[in-house]
Amino acid sequence: MTQHTNTSPAFVPLEQETRSSLPTREAAHHLNRKMQTLHIWACKENGPIRPIRVSGRLAWRVADIKRVLAGGAHA
C-alpha cells in the first residue's frame, strides 16, 4: 500500500500571521485566488489591493488582505 504525503506548503492562519506582508503564493492562498490573478492585479493596478516591492519581489500587506476578506473597500 502506498502512503500519500501532503506536499502542499503549510500556511500560517492569517489571524496568527506576525509578518507585515506576505509573498504572492501565501497572499493568493488567503484570498482564495490564483497567483496569476494577483500578478495581474499588480501589473494592471486594478485589483482590490496593491502590492509593495520587497527586494524586487511582490509582497502583499497583511492588513490589506484582512481588509479585503472583511469586505473592505479598495486600497
Image (spheres, rainbow, N blue to C red):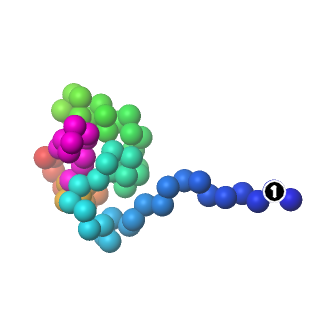
Residue nearest the observer in this picture, 4 or 67:
4
Query: Visible in this render: residue 50?
Result: no
Q: Name the residue furthest left.
A: 75
The range drawn in magenta is 52-61
- Where is 18 relative to 35, above or below? below
Q: Is residue 23 left or right of residue 10?
A: left
Q: Is residue 57 magenta?
A: yes
Secondary structure that dominates the magenta span: strand
Residue in the image at 39% along x and 39% along y: 35
Q: Name the residue furthest right.
A: 1
Residue nearest the observer in this picture, 13 or 56:
56
Residue under label 1: 2
Name the quadrant containing residue 62.
bottom left
Residue in the image at 20% along x and 45% along y: 54
Residue in the image at 15% along x and 50% along y: 73
Residue 75 location, x and y as percent?
A: 13, 46
Name the quadrant containing residue 24.
top left
The amino acid pointed to by label 1 is Thr
Residue 31 location, x and y as percent?
A: 35, 51
Q: Is residue 49 left or right of residue 36?
A: left
Q: Is residue 47 magenta?
A: no
Residue in the image at 23% along x and 55% along y: 21
